[in-house]
Amino acid sequence: LKLPSGRGSAASPAPRVPRAPGRGRLLLGLEGVAMAAAQAAQVQPRPGFEGWSFPVCSVRGVPVRVHAFLPLSMVLSAASAAAVGVGMMGVLCAVLVSGPLLLLTVLVHEFGHVLAARQCGFAPDHILLWPLGGLAYISKDGITPRQQIYVSSMGPATHLPMMALWAVAMLAFNGGRVQLAPSLGWRYTTHFVPIVCLMMLVNNMAMLLFNLLVPCIPLDCSQIFVSLLLMCGCQVDFAAKIMVFVSIPVVCVLIGLSIWGMLGTVASLSSSMNLVLAFWLGVQTWQLHQARMQGLLSAMPLFATAMAQQNAAAAQEGAAGSSQARTFGGSNKFKPFEGTGNVLGRTTNSEVCLGSVVAVALSLAIAAQVAAAQ
């Protein structure tokens, strides 16, 4: 049954509705913002501390969530700076460095992990910004140790261009000089920008070294260290055991430094965040130890691929031994486990940036030096 070719037919175009110039672009822009907010809201927070987070935006298709306790680091930095006696401009500098500038630095760090994971064919889930730094949740089912090293190292690598950027800024605002310590006579009222550049340069250096040289689970250094052990042919259980024994003294040292800082007069309030950081790292180390003792390392994405390959190799050896026993007429009483286990739920791993706490402590130490120089 054909419709007439007059009004209302399928062939006739719908009449255009006149609209104001630029209205379509405005609606498209608002629609893009709404879609990004909806995409960020679709990520369901995990139970535990992440349940206190809320979505804020979506950057390049990756939802970003912010923890409700995130302003705590800025409050502690401001209180510590006020206790040192740096004045109003010093407190403003501490809030600026430990607030938006540090969060932007952590976000760039986490996006280094995200972009590297995408290059390897893995999908990022979301990024969480919390008082101790940032967490990039990436679905890495089937990741190899070589790919893990690349993904883990690209986060700290982002601090190199940021250090160069702050060094150039210091050159421009400090009379063509780059320094890692405040000069005698620096004041917040007259050298505010050079002090900010100095703090951010030192912060990026501290975050680079902390994430690459501190072998404690689940820092980037620990994931690189475990991947190197697996690439060298180390058994999964033994690699996890080494990681636990290496992480324990690191946690103890962090606890000792935190307590020593809390007993001092400089940056004593921010040292409480270092103690929280050490406690969180201790919990992660205990969870790795429990997973190893209970035989659940295959549920951890860092060990899942190597564990599957190890089980497959054992199954092949068992099958070869079984066929050889049947060939010689032997009885095959022992039947090894064949196949690999299945991990229930979404397999995700977190790339962690926890150097921000150390960066805040260093910033407050620099603020104390500036106050002493005044």
Image (cartoon, grey):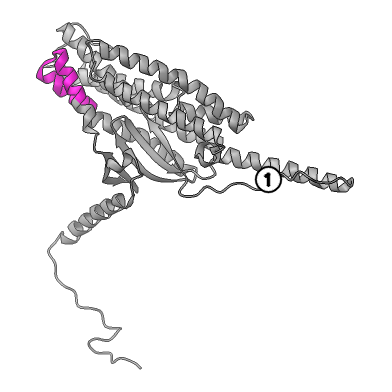
Residue 179 shows up from this direction:
no
Q: Which quarter of the figure is the N terminus placed in?
A: bottom left
| Count of marks overlaid on the render | 1
> Is the C terminus in the top left, top right, bottom left or bottom right quadrant?
top left
Residue at position x 19%, y 11% from top?
A: 370
Left or right: 142 as drawn, with respect to 218 = right
**Residue under label 1:** 337
Q: Position of residue 253 (x, y in %)?
A: 40, 15
- Which residue appears farthest toward the front when viewing the image? 333
Quick one: SS at disc 1?
A: loop
User: Residue sitting at 68 percent across and 47 percent down?
Assistant: 338
State which region is magenta.
76-98
Magenta region includes residue 85: yes
Q: Residue at x 30, y 26 (%)?
A: 165
On screen, 109 above or below 370?
Answer: below
- Give the left or right position of residue 245, taking residue 134 as reference: right
Three-letter amino acid code at disc 1? Phe
On the image, the x and y values in percent for residue 284 come to 43, 30
Residue 131 lies within the magenta run: no
Q: Residues within 10 Å of mark 1 (few under 14, many from 20)?
A: few
Camera-nearest residue between 284 and 331: 331
Q: Nearer the viewer, residue 287 or 274?
A: 287
Q: Is residue 262 above or below residue 68?
A: above
Image coords of residue 190 (percent x, y): 12, 15
State which quadrant residue 99 falls in.
top left
The majority secondary structure of the magenta stretch comes to helix
* Residue 293 in sight here: yes
